[in-house]
Image (tube, grey):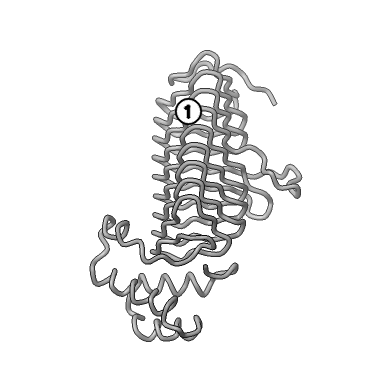
Amino acid sequence: MLIEQAHKITTKLHPTALISANANLGKNVEIGPFSIIEDDVSIGNDTLIGNCTTICSGTKIGSNSKIFHNCSIGEIPQDLKFSGEDTETLIGNNTIIRENVTINRGTSALGKTEVGSNVLLMAAVHIAHDCIIRDNVIMANMSTLGGHVEIQENASLGGGVLVHQFCKIGSHAFIGGGFRAVQDVPPYILAVGEPLKFGGINSIGLKRRGFSLDTLSKIKKTYKMYFRSGLTRSKALDAINNMFSDNKEVKNIINFIDNSERGII
């Protein structure tokens, strides 16, 4: 693949950065020393790429994002079934990717790995192939995702969290640092312990995001019935549906559980 030194683009490009003539750079893009931008890369306006970072072919990065030093974005996956198929890595707007983060591109199974907008990936995070990271997600230092993981909007992972392949983490959920998820984590909860288990609702995060006291009460009652009522989980879901069928957050919980493929923690 031919990588040429950048020229003629009205951006701040360090002279040691190697930028393909087939890359598409927006306005006011900044690229630091010794970084490499390969063919078929698109970088939106006002985005910063730090030092010694590689942006691989098929990567599309939105506007006003910041990717710090020594990152690898869009490299081929560590999936032995991968056979060179043409896939993508998508990064949204206003997303911050700190030092030493690795994001692998998708395989033919999904065709892409996607990180949304307003996401914060702290140092040494790893995101494997075919993962979907929704908007406003925070992943703390050294948290790691296996392939095909979905992290829904506003979820947070503490430092060193490990998530098994094909797991889903629900919206507004928080997983405490150092724990591992091998099953799905439903929305709005705090998940802690080994093995990972329900530790209450994520009340601090939900209050910060403007959830009403009435909604918090219904979410709390929903999970108390599901996890701690003594009913089977299927019967608990029926009772929850009868009690709170008019609440959109409870409907979200029920839908998440109904569609879980790996089971709920």
The answer to whether 24 is drawn above or below residue 192 in the figure is above
Residue at 42 percent of width and 71 percent of height? 253
Q: Position of residue 102 (x, y in %)?
A: 57, 38
Q: Position of residue 154 (x, y in %)?
A: 39, 54
Query: Which element is circle 1 on?
Result: strand
- Classify the position of the N terminus by image quarter: top right
88 and 202: which one is in front? 202
73 and 22: which one is in front? 73
The answer to whether 32 is drawn above or below residue 182 in the figure is above
**Residue that sits furthest to the front in the current view:** 194
Q: Position of residue 24 (x, y in %)?
A: 53, 30
Q: Position of residue 14 (x, y in %)?
A: 49, 16
Residue at 57 percent of width and 50 percent of height? 145
Residue at 45 percent of width and 29 percent of height? 26
Amino acid carrying label 1: it is Ile
User: Label 1: few (<14), some or many (≥20) within 10 Å?
Assistant: many
**Which residue is the site of mark 1?**
49
Q: Report the number of numbered marks.
A: 1
**Residue that sits furthest to the left in the current view:** 213
Residue at 57 percent of width and 70 percent of height? 263
The answer to whether 218 is drawn above or below residue 193 in the figure is below
169 and 22: which one is in front? 169
211 and 195: which one is in front? 195
The answer to whether 225 is drawn above or below residue 32 in the figure is below
